[in-house]
Image (spheres, coloured by chain):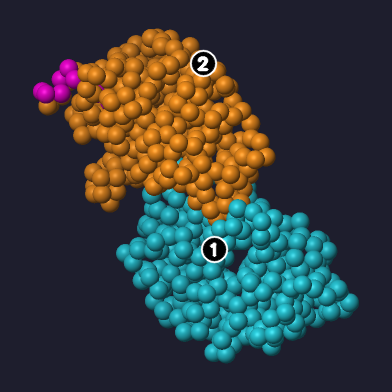
Chain colours: A orange, B cyan
Amino acid sequence: MKAAYFDGKNMRLDNNYHDPKPGEVLVRVNLTGICGTDLEILDGYMAYDGILGHEFVGTVERSENPDLIGKRVVGEINVGCGNCKSCEKRMDRHCPNRTVLGILKRDGAFAEFLSLPEKNLYVIPDSITDEQAVFVEPLTAAFEIKEQVTLQPSWSVAVVGDGRLAQLIIQVLKLTCPNITCFGRHKSKLKSLINIGVKIKIGIEKSDEQFFDLVVEATGSNSGFADTMKLIKPRGTVILKSTIASRENLDLTPTVVNEITLIGSRCGLFKPAIDALATGTVSIDSMIDSTFPLEKFQEAIQHAKNLTL
Amino acid sequence: MKAAYFDGKNMRLDNNYHDPKPGEVLVRVNLTGICGTDLEILDGYMAYDGILGHEFVGTVERSENPDLIGKRVVGEINVGCGNCKSCEKRMDRHCPNRTVLGILKRDGAFAEFLSLPEKNLYVIPDSITDEQAVFVEPLTAAFEIKEQVTLQPSWSVAVVGDGRLAQLIIQVLKLTCPNITCFGRHKSKLKSLINIGVKIKIGIEKSDEQFFDLVVEATGSNSGFADTMKLIKPRGTVILKSTIASRENLDLTPTVVNEITLIGSRCGLFKPAIDALATGTVSIDSMIDSTFPLEKFQEAIQHAKNLTL
């Protein structure tokens, strides 16, 4: 099959990459997203070589379950070993021996086909387009916050970052918390948020410091963490969404002195994300910047990198 | 009065240091403890000059309230401005304009006298000796954990560190959680813990990694944080007790990937700590290593430093 292969340093198009291994469901990739994590892996965040890509929507080509064939699916990207304590508790996402689609020991979606176990797949209803469905995986990361924190409508909430994940998070938090401020760098990206009543700020003012009950760090940069720590109120809660390739002299002293709670947060359950897209609770209008064929992956990645500048 | 004055670089005995300012309760210091934070301030952790010392028990010499005179007291060390949002919520401890006894813009206990507002003072019952009472302040830091986390008896708990604070924390956690392991460096310090059924370990074994539901970091060192992150289970909770003078290349990526909750934790309410000493729920037997007169403060500090090696 055709695939964009990353050898640990560079990516190249391989027209004769081996097909995904048998024994799992074979999915033809319809659309795949480029995530900040992909860009970090390309920058050396993890010692990964193989096919990148973990946000996808595809069509089932081959499956032992005939009902699945021809269905459009999205997929939970973590595959547990099935034999450990985490897997027993259905926490495959935290299995120490897991593989992760396009991230850890498992080829991903920058290819014609991918494979996953049947239990990882979710059939997408017809009311959701491919363009929406490709956002299910990042949207689960937004909904995960609701699984970890009991949001209070009275809270002043800040989201640091204005990328795609930040925008999805804001939409999800807005379902519970009316008072949200987004600290971003690109006013152009944030227009749609103004329409739903989110305050937009470029830069932190004195009155913002230690003002917010909840701050979500979704920038993917060191300065994002520093900004977050400026905004959070004593005894407030910080959600950490970015996995960052390099950290320099990060100081946790304010965390102790101000008794901050920092919660690491990854992707979450698929069902709430699919429902939110099906009912229109979350909108991804205007969030696809460009679409490229697989052959133009270099151009696509450069485009994604430029968007994060 | 006599006081050990720290000029920001060195400490020296001053026989004619000015008396504490009037308008507050004047307390003659009976005993004072040397805390890890004191040693960090001496190492440059905060730009502080003045009298150090914030763990004390004393006797009231002068007060507008005649009932207080002659009473033995301990004291909440944070003095809020009284006019901000934190103070309104009785969170003087988090007032942005606060002074802190022996730590921030307020002379401390390494002196003949100190002063604090009356509302900061707690009268100590006769059943508590001075030697016990001087532990009230660090003991509040142990009880603070119970205010921040709902402890589960089923949890496997690790405490990293074997200093005085770690030992107090272990005694408090043991009231709820029977399964506690202390990761320390000095077996001699830990004998008393074995008697109450705590497992003692010098060094982390493979089977300890990602094993613990709750890990308390109470070492005051960078390596303590790294050890903590090795021990904590995915989705576990970490309590951060150390304020550390220097942090180098601290990596929060595992916090995100394993969805860890990190909770900064400082000192807490005085009432539970006083009650625990009065009832014997917490014992400080054998926790006073040596006692020195004020004049021998250099020797005392060197002794405290040696104990942390």
Residue placed most toward the observer, A264 or B271: B271
Going by the numbered disc 2, the residue's amino acid type is Gln
Crowd tier of the residue under label 1, counting other residues whose Cα lies within 10 Å: few below 14, some 14–19, many 20 or above: many
The answer to which of B206 and A284 lies nearer the viewer is: A284
Residue identifier under label 1: B218
Q: Would you identify the image quadrant in which residue B305 lies? A: bottom right
Which type of secondary structure does the marked residue at label 2 adopt? Answer: helix
Residue at left offset 51%, top offset 65% = B144
> Which residue is at the front of the view, B148 or A78?
B148
Write the residue at 41% across / 11% down: A291
* Coordinates of residue B237 in the picture (x, y in percent): 43, 55
Q: Could you tell me if the residues under marks 2 and 1 are in contact, i.e. CB atoms within 8 Å?
A: no
A72 is within the stretch colored magenta: yes
Q: Residue furthest left?
A: A66
Name, please, the residue furthest toward the right: B16
| Amino acid type of the residue tagged 1 in the rendering | Ala
Q: Are marks 2 and 1 on the same chain?
A: no
What distance separates the C-alpha of mark 2 from that of mark 1? 45 Å
Q: Residue at x 48, y 28 (%)?
A: A197
Residue A144 colored in magenta in the image:
no
The region drawn magenta spans A66-74
Question: Image height check: is B23 above or below B253?
Answer: below
Residue at far bottom of view:
B126
Image coordinates for residue A77, horizontal then vertical, percent? 32, 32
Secondary element at tag 1: loop
Q: Is residue B172 above or below residue A58?
A: below
* Residue B113 seen: yes
The answer to whether residue B176 is above or below residue A276 is below
